[in-house]
Amino acid sequence: YITIVGRSKDLIISGGYNVYPAEIEGYLNDMPGVAESAVVGVPHPDFGEVGVAIVIAKPGAALDADAMVAELKARLANFKIPKRCFVVAELPRNAMGKVQKALLREQHKGLFG
């Protein structure tokens, strides 16, 4: 058995399937040029929720969001693929240095309707 560890509040339920952001982030972080990533669930009119990936590039690296999604399609099931991917300069963090996923969810909640 394989166990994926992540916070239950970060779990994305997309079309009735459980999607664990930690699994997708692991694949994203292994891609060349990716320094760090975060995947959050946002409301979607057809699927309930879908994943959105926010990625930071390593210094000097140029990332193509479409190419990253295409690479994920070769590795993950369709329902796990983030519907959108954004490359940003930095992720919002709290005083302890943890990524504020709630803030990311809030920033991207209106993407699909």
Image: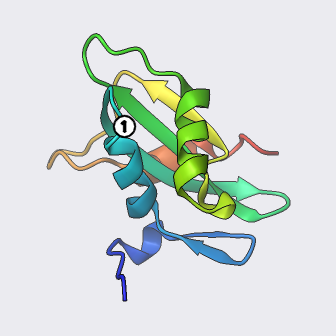
What x and y, as percent, mark residue 1?
37, 89
Q: Secondary structure at mark 1?
A: loop
Q: Where 106 falls versus 91 (above or below)?
A: below
The kind of residue tagged 1 is: Met
Pick whichever, 73 or 50, lies toward us: 73
What x and y, as percent, mark residue 110?
71, 42
- Say which residue label 1 marks: 31
What x and y, as percent, mark residue 96?
14, 49
What x and y, as percent, mark residue 6?
35, 71
Pick whichever, 82 or 108, lies toward us: 82
Quadrant of the image occupied by residue 24: bottom left
Quadrant of the image occupied by residue 46: bottom right
Q: Residue furthest left?
A: 96
Q: Where 39 falls versus 110 (above or below)?
A: below
Dot 1 alpha-carbon crowd within 10 angstroms: few under 14, some 14 to 19, many 20 or more: some
Which residue sits at x=67%, y=45%? 83
Left or right of residue 54, residue 74 in this image: right
